[in-house]
Image: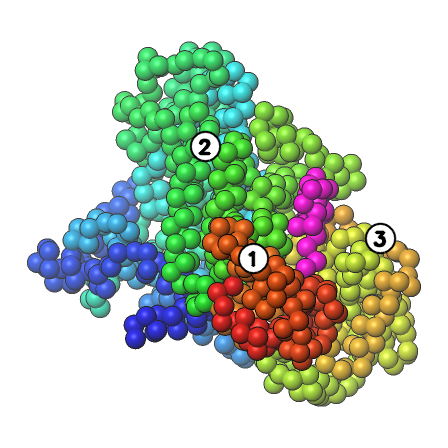
């Protein structure tokens, strides 16, 4: 019974199951049992009541957060004409609400994010007014600055010790929603003011841990291959977020020229913050935060970045140049040079200057937890006589390998430890996937492939694109990748590599890695804020990433492609956003409604809401076979139809839809239509239009066109409608877009910055002509709806040529005779499905669409999704009727 229940639970995990639920299930299987309430263990071990534990924990936090000398903040001066001092807009509020997570713990006021997402128009207006009152006055309600701290046991730590618990601060979700709006304005101001140097890589738009990993790995590799010594220091900062002083934060804001309402809000945000601790329902007394940036706050990461941004300025000139990389509180300092003594002198000066800069900000480096790594040039030897270095007279331990942002860097830069760790963790995850699926039971193939990509492939690609791996290491990673795919599809280990990739619609790890590396380089080459990073990478020709940058420098088209600014020239909150509706009343999901219901709901909305508007239907189309992209619009009231073809391919369907909207908006202006509604079936295109932070030039042009029409007294509205449900105007626009693939010559200009990812994919295909079949995979997917796991496995094996037929069993030595049980011919997949006369009648009954002797008609049926599903079900009935479904194929 227990096994049956477990199999039923495993089979309930599908593509619609929340990823968090699947992940928690896998962790529960992997981890050892943990106490349900570890604080009970602490209470029993210390023989204290929860109230006393809460008080002790609060006192310890207050001790860390205390500060004897504090600089007074200036009084709030009000607006000073800066764009950042504009009143908060409703579009900013709606955008911030849209970005909220539904499942998030509420603060002391008990209001969760879900309640904020459910607010109606009247409540939104009231909240908008409240936020503007706070913004203009610079006075934040005290309840929004109070945190409820929950002690949470750290992984692998003993629950009986108070130091084993991490403080999790819960603050008001209403206050954090306002912080989201202010954060976007502050980020815009700081990026426009070029306040962040290139070595700050955390919590910035367009930057990530990949930038830090690539910078550290390539700089060390280049030094080693250039016959230079490299010293790398990985500095640990004690309680960085909790220890930084408010005066340091204010000084950083002053240096960044943050003034007016923004400065007043931030000063009040940091002042008079309080907290209490909750242990099993017992609340401690209220304590004060006198230092540190608030834990759990939306604004804390960017404020900490700003404090750390000027940390390099306090270091006096050194014999060799310094290379600094900072990701939050993870600091990596590197010195490269040919003279060992000068490298050592430079490191000594740099460490002293860095330590002084940290102390000035209320921070303290921990020499015991910091690491020093020496990367020795090829052919040279540096033994234990290499001078040791220290911070505050405490030596920094020298290690052969160090951990930085989850990556193990060894002094030889061979990456063997990192690859071995990746493979070891990948195999553990693979075993977990095997525990929720088998050949004939458990989770379906699609969900398992998703889990494989999220848990195994993502771990490989976290490092592989940015480091130099040996061929044997690539082969080991490829084997792990293929093992995950075969487990997901239920394929045996001898299945063809090419067929396995084609069936899963996957690519080899090396191609994934190069694709991600090219995306990284393309992003760096076309972004102003990353220009120096890309320039450095181009010069590091001894690294694989540097060689890739040099070999594909034409990818960026730097002569013709303008570099994208770090932030839009116009403040996003000042951009006009047209009235846009992304839903239809009474229609929750198109997939859950019949076409008739969806069409009636859309037509009722059009007749009730837009009866005074001119209807403009738009559509875009992509045809991969003809390699073309088209756009079209149709205005029924004046019988105006337009269609066009893009001059560039490939582009995404969203871009084709945006082109249609742009030309339709221009047509409305030219024809002088006073009130119009643009009707499109692309939610993604509309989301681009209504998001002022979207960097798409097409979306900006559409917003600008709508704004110009408004200035002339017109009104232009955007509305989503369901596709292919029989709405006449929409069907006409769809026909125009489809026919344009053959009837039009390319004429639509596409901005150079659009769909760069697709251009990168095309370049990878050109660089790997031997695997174009895998890259350009046109094999129809297996429709798995309502198919049990066992049948899915059998079909995948048949489609990949790895089924256990008599011929295959004879080939692997498990059977002596390869002949069919009904005739003397060898029993192959083709023989069973298309040739054996014993199955002729059942073949005629269940597979009428298949031409005689054509195996692809049986295994890879063409047609629409519904037609392919029907033909696949016919194959299933054939296998059941012939008894083949009962065989262990």
- State if disc 2 and disc 3 touch (CB < 8 Å): no
- Other residues around mark 3 within 10 Å, as few (<14) / some (14–19) / many (≥20): some
Residue at the (62%, 25%) spot, across then down: 541
Residue extent of the magenta highlight: 757-781
Residue at the (42%, 48%) spot, across then down: 426
Separation of residues labelled 3 and 2 (CA atoms): 44 Å
Pick whichever of labels 3 and 2 is earlier in the sequence.
2
**Residue sitting nearer the eye, 32 or 618:** 32
Using residue 596 as the reference point, say whether residue 35 is left or right of it: left
Separation of residues labelled 3 and 1 (CA atoms): 55 Å
Asked which secondary structure carries label 2, the reply is: loop
The residue tagged 1 is 818
The residue tagged 3 is 647
Asked which secondary structure carries label 1, the reply is: loop
Residue 352 x/y as whole percent: 37, 24
Label placed on residue 675: none
Asked which secondary structure carries label 3, the reply is: loop
The answer to whether residue 532 of the structure is visible from this angle is no
The N terminus: image quadrant? bottom left
Using residue 653 as the reference point, say whether residue 838 is left or right of it: left
Residue 315 x/y as whole percent: 45, 25
Vertical relation: 882 (above or below) 515: below
**Residue sitting nearer the eye, 672 or 248:** 672
Using residue 735 as the reference point, say whether residue 431 is left or right of it: left
């Amino acid at each position: 019974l227990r096994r049956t229940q477990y199999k039923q639970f495993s089979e309930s995990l599908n593509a619609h199951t929340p990823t968090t639920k699947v992940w928690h299930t896998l962790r529960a299987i992997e981890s050892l049992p943990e106490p349900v309430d570890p604080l009970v263990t602490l209470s029993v071990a210390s023989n204290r009541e929860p109230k006393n534990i809460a008080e002790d924990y609060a006192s310890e936090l207050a001790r860390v957060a205390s500060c004897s000398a504090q600089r007074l903040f200036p009084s709030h001066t009000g607006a000073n004409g800066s764009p950042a001092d504009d009143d908060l807009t409703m579009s900013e509020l709606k955008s911030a609400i849209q970005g909220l997570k539904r499942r998030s713990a509420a603060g002391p006021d008990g209001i969760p994010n879900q309640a904020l997402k459910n607010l109606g128009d009247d409540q939104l207006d009231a909240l908008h007014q409240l936020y503007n009152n706070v913004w203009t006055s610079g006075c934040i309600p005290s309840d929004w600055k109070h945190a409820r701290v929950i002690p949470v046991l750290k992984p692998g730590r003993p629950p009986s010790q108070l130091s084993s618990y991490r403080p999790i601060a819960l603050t008001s979700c209403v206050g954090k929603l306002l912080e989201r709006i202010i954060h976007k304005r502050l980020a815009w101001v700081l990026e426009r003011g070029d306040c962040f140097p290139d070595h700050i890589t955390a919590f910035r738009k367009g930057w990530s841990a990949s930038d830090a990993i690539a910078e550290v790995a390539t700089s060390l590799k280049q030094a080693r291959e250039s016959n230079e010594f490299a010293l790398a220091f990985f500095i640990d900062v004690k309680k960085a977020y909790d220890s930084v002083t408010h005066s340091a934060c204010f000084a950083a804001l002053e240096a960044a020229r943050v003034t007016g309402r923004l400065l007043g809000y931030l000063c009040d945000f940091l002042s008079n913050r309080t907290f209490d601790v909750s242990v099993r329902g017992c609340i401690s007394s209220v304590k004060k935060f006198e230092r540190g940036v608030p834990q759990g706050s939306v604004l804390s990461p960017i404020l900490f970045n700003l404090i750390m941004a000027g940390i390099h300025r306090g270091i006096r000139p050194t014999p060799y140049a310094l290379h600094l990389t900072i990701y939050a509180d993870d600091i990596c300092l590197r010195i490269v040079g040919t003279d060992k003594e000068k490298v050592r002198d430079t490191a000594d000066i740099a460490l002293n200057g860095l330590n002084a800069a940290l102390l000035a900000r209320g921070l303290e480096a921990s020499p015991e937890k910091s690491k020093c790594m020496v990367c020795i040039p090829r052919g040279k030897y540096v033994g234990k006589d290499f001078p040791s270095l220290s911070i505050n007279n405490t030596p920094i331990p020298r290690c052969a390998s160090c951990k930085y942002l989850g990556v193990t860097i060894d002094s030889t830069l061979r990456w063997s430890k990192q690859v071995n760790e990746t493979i070891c963790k990948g195999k553990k995850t693979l075993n977990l996937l095997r525990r929720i699926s088998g050949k004939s039971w458990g989770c379906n193939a699609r969900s398992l492939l998703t889990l494989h990509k999220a848990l195994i492939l993502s771990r490989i690609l976290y490092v592989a694109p940015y480091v130099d791996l040996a061929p044997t290491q690539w082969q080991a990673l490829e084997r792990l990748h293929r093992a995950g795919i075969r487990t997901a599809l239920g394929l045996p280990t001898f299945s063809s590599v090419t067929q396995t990739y084609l069936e899963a619609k996957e690519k080899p790890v090396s191609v994934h890695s190069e694709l991600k590396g090219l995306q990284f380089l393309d992003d760096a080459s076309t972004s102003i804020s990353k220009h120096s990073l890309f320039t450095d990478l181009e010069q590091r020709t001894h690294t694989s990433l540097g060689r890739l940058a040099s070999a594909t420098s034409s990818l960026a088209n730097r002569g013709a492609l303008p570099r994208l600014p770090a932030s839009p020239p116009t403040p996003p909150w000042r951009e006009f956003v047209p009235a846009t509706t992304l839903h239809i009343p009474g229609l929750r999901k198109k997939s859950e409604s019949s076409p008739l219901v969806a069409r009636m709901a859309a037509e009722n909305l059009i007749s009730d809401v837009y009866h005074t508007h001119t209807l403009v239907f738009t559509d875009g189309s992509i045809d991969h076979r003809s390699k073309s992209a088209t756009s079209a619009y149709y205005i029924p009231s004046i019988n105006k139809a337009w269609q066009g073809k893009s001059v560039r391919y490939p582009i995404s369907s969203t871009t084709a839809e945006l082109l249609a909207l742009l030309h339709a908006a221009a047509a409305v202006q030219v024809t002088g239509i006073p009130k119009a509604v643009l009707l499109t079936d692309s939610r993604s295109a509309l989301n681009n239009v209504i998001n002022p932070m979207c960097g798409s030039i097409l979306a900006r042009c559409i917003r600008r066109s709508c704004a110009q029409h408004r200035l002339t007294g017109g009104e232009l509205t955007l509305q989503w409608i369901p596709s292919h449900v029989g709405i006449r105007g929409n069907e006409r626009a769809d026909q125009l877009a489809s026919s344009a693939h053959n009837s039009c010559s390319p004429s639509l200009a596409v901005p150079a910055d659009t769909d760069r990812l697709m251009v990168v994919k095309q370049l990878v295909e050109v660089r790997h002509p031997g695997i174009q079949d895998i890259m350009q995979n046109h094999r129809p997917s297996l429709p798995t709806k309502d198919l049990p796991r066992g049948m899915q496995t059998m079909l995948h094996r048949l489609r990949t040529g790895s089924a256990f037929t008599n011929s295959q069993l004879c080939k692997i030595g498990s059977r002596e005779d390869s002949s069919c049980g009904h005739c003397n011919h060898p029993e192959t997949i083709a023989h069973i499905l298309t040739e054996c006369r014993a199955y002729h009648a059942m073949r005629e009954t269940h597979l009428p669409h298949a031409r005689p002797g054509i195996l692809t008609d049986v295994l890879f049926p063409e047609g629409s999704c519904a037609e392919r599903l029907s033909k696949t079900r016919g194959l299933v009935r054939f296998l059941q009727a012939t008894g083949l479904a009962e065989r262990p194929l």
